[in-house]
Amino acid sequence: MCVLGTCSVVGDPHITTFDGKSFSMYGKCSYVLSEHCHYGSGDKQFDIELQNSDCKEYVQGLMSCTRQLIVRVKGGPIITLGSSKSAANYITPTVLLNGNVADRYVDETVEIEFVGAENVLVHGKPGFVVHWTGHNVYVTVGPALEIKTCGLCGTFNHEVADDFH
């Protein structure tokens, strides 16, 4: 049976780790959301950086929102996931690939696809998927990354107690 772990970052932001621990993170800075670690003698395969700043749509200074994600996969392009407001005032996701606008990309390390107008999926060869809505993010990892993740999403090992070791 294939067991997956999903970490979610929603709202201002409320985070739930791969193992189900929930907390709120109101800082306005850059953080490691998840990265490849505990991998022995090999090389780090990926990292996902979360960038939070003020939620201007709410009371300034009281909340932070996820404004951007930086996804790096060994041997692949630097993927910047951001957002913009549509004409109808909806938040829509944007993708930059090494600084250039992209709407789809595939190589041996990563695949980027838009699903409808409000969802971007980044499939990383190391065994993860990032689902970005322009405001909320969901990172799902598979069995190949069990016990090999760290960051705000925790260690994917079915043990809530060690998520912030």
Image (spheres, rainbow, N blue to C red):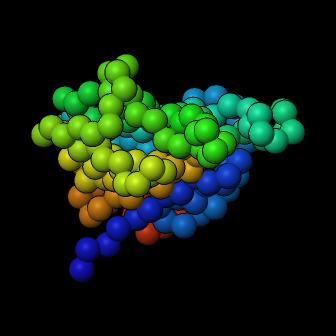
Q: Residue at x 50, y 34 (%)?
A: 82
Q: Residue at x 22, y 30 (%)?
A: 76
Q: Horizontally, is 16 left or right of 124 in the view?
A: right
**Residue 128 position (above or below residue 51):** below
Locate residue 101, reporting x and y percent. 36, 26
Q: Horizontally, is 91 left or right of 36 in the view?
A: right
Q: Residue at x 49, y 65 (%)?
A: 19
Q: Horizontally, is 9 left or right of 139 in the view?
A: right
Q: Nearer the viewer, residue 147 or 22?
A: 22
Locate residue 96, reporting x and y percent. 38, 28
Q: Horizontally, is 18 left or right of 54 in the view?
A: left
Residue 35, located in which quarter of the rendered image? Answer: top left
- Residue 34 visible to the viewer: yes
Locate residue 18, reporting x and y percent. 47, 61
**Residue 2 position (above or below residue 102):** below
Residue 10, located in which quarter of the rendered image? Answer: bottom right
Query: Residue farthest to the bottom?
Result: 1
Query: Residue farthest to the front?
Result: 87
- Residue 165 visible to the viewer: no
**Residue 40 position (above or below residue 116):** above
Q: Residue at x 32, y 37 (%)?
A: 103
**Residue 99 position (above or below residue 58):** above
Q: Nearer the viewer, residue 38 or 4?
A: 4
Q: Nearer the viewer, residue 117 or 157?
A: 117
Query: Residue farthest to the top?
Result: 99
